[in-house]
Image: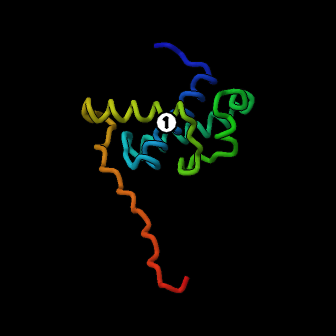
């Protein structure tokens, strides 16, 4: 088994938080269970707390500054993360869901706002 450095582990967990949060909050889908996501989140919080110097120099440090691991709803999603999320979601849905995978749900329909009716006053 290959050992990861602290920096590599922090980067891995950050990417997982970003990708899976994007899938969940923006695409209304789910690939990993809430329990698995929470486990990863708490591990990342612990790593960032234990190794602040390493955490400060690893990719996406700005997005995880003061992050407490409670939610991925307010994270910002760069384009590379979005692309990874789409690839992973496509793979999960075409390969079939396995292990921790939760069956994807249908996307929520976007409701378009109707234009107000003219009253003839203007």
Density class for disc 1 (Cα within 10 Å; few <14, some 14-19, many ≥20) is some
Q: How is the image coloured?
A: rainbow
| Relative horizontal placement of residue 89, taking residue 8 as reference (left or right) | left
Disc 1 marks which residue? 82
Quarter of the image with the C terminus in it: bottom right
Q: Position of residue 32 (x, y in %)?
A: 38, 40
Q: Please, is residue 115 above or below residue 120 in the view?
A: above
- Judged left or right of residue 4, residue 119 is left
- Of residue 62 and residue 69, the one placed in the foreground of this image is 62
Q: Nearer the viewer, residue 28 or 8?
A: 28
In terms of secondary structure, where does tag 1 sit? helix
Q: Is residue 33 left or right of residue 48?
A: left
Quarter occupied by residue 45: top right
Q: Image point 30% across, 34% down: which residue?
A: 99
Q: Position of residue 52 (x, y in %)?
A: 72, 33
Which residue ends up furthest to the top in the rendered image? 2
Where residue 49 sits: x, y (%)? 68, 38
> Which residue appears farthest toward the right when viewing the image?
53
Q: How many marks?
A: 1
Asked which quadrant contains residue 108, the reply is bottom left
**Residue 75 or 40: which is nearer the viewer?**
75
Q: Residue at x 75, y 29 (%)?
A: 53
Looking at the image, which residue is at 46% across and 49% down? 25
Judged left or right of residue 73, residue 107 is left
Q: Position of residue 16 (x, y in %)?
A: 50, 34
């Amino acid at each position: 088994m290959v050992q990861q450095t602290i920096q590599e582990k922090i980067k891995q967990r950050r990417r997982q938080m970003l990708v899976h949060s994007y899938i969940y909050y923006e695409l209304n889908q789910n690939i990993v269970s809430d329990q698995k996501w929470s486990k990863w989140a708490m591990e990342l919080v612990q790593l960032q707390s234990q190794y602040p110097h390493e955490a400060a120099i690893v990719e996406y440090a700005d997005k995880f500054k003061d992050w407490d691991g409670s939610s991925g709803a307010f994270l910002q999603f760069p384009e590379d993360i979005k692309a990874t999320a789409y690839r992973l979601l496509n793979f999960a849905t075409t390969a079939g869901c396995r292990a921790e995978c939760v069956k994807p749900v249908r996307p929520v329909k976007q409701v378009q706002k109707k234009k107000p009716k003219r009253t003839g006053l203007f």
